[in-house]
Amino acid sequence: MFYVSIGLSLHLISIISTLIGSYGSTLRYKSIDRLKPIGKHSLLGASGEISDFQEILRYLDELILYDNMWDDGNSLGPKEMHNYLTRVMYNRRNKFNPLWNALVLGGVKNGQKYLGMVNMIGINFEDNHVATGLGNHLARPILRDEWHENLTFEEGVKLLEKCMRVLLYRDRSAINKIQISKITEEGATLFPPFSLKTYWEFSAFKNPTVGAEGSW
């Protein structure tokens, strides 16, 4: 499972994910919702354990409820949410009972966009583009070459689809069903899932062992 996310314009963040839920090596569930709006200003995506993601969502529900109880006209922004999640993940790691997720959190508040990630042991950073899992190794080099601050939403979606296609070709446990989301100052939008167009007629795909025969 992998996530790819980019910041587009000053007031727009886009996150894309696959919808697979595996049971061991079995691709058991193919419509798992891994994107969730959090509060008024944030959007969260998670790769990894579905049950641990549900536990994280429970933590966040309690946090937002407590924040709303103050009724002071303020609300937690994406930076505060990300900081909270880094503490949760690092705390659970120190108890040798980690939450087996890598999280991507993006949002916009007061005209400022924010995009960060945190993994299961609390390692975290913020950047203009982030990814989890295999995406860290194969998608981010593409983003470093092609991302720029003034990407439109349509251009950003094409770039994200390119990244997901590269990842799909190199992960036998992936499926081509993906979901795109975006968040602006007005709130989060989750678009309907769709199947990514693929092309399997490359010669290397047809006969991958050519030139690589072993001693067997």
Image (spheres, rainbow, N blue to C red):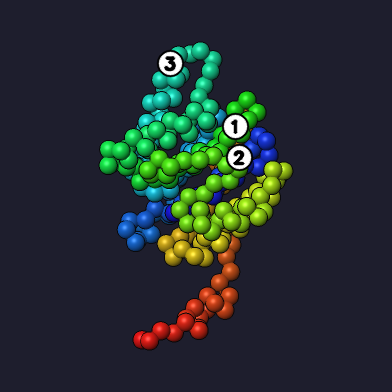
Residues at circles 1 and 2 in contact by the CB criterion of under 8 Å: yes
Q: Which residue is mark 3?
A: 69
Q: Earlier in the sequence, mark 2 or mark 3?
A: 2
Distance from disc 3 to disc 1, alpha carbons, whole Å, reads: 22 Å
Q: Residue at x 42, y 62 (%)?
A: 173
Q: Residue at x 53, y 27 (%)?
A: 77
Q: Residues within 10 Å of mark 3 (few under 14, many from 20)?
A: few
Q: Nearer the viewer, residue 148 or 158?
A: 148
Q: Earlier in the sequence, mark 1 or mark 2?
A: 2
Tell me the mark number nearer the camera, choosing from 3 and 1. Answer: 1
Work out whether 68 lies above or below 114: above
Residue 10: image quadrant is top right
Q: Regarding mark 3 in the picture, which secondary structure is present there?
A: helix
> Could you tell me how many numbered marks the image carries?
3
Q: Regarding mark 2 in the picture, which secondary structure is present there?
A: strand
Q: Is residue 186 visible?
A: no
Distance from disc 2 to disc 3, alpha carbons, whole Å, reads: 28 Å
Q: Residue at x 54, y 46 (%)?
A: 130
Q: Residues within 10 Å of mark 1 (few under 14, many from 20)?
A: many
Q: Which residue is mark 2?
A: 13
Q: Quadrant of the C terminus?
A: bottom left
Tag 1: amino acid:
Val
Q: Nearer the viewer, residue 90 or 147?
A: 90
Tag 2: amino acid:
Ile
Q: Which residue is mark 1?
A: 108
Q: Earlier in the sequence, mark 3 or mark 1?
A: 3
Q: Is residue 92 visible?
A: yes
> x, y percentage for residue 17?
51, 50
Q: Nearer the viewer, residue 152 or 6?
A: 6
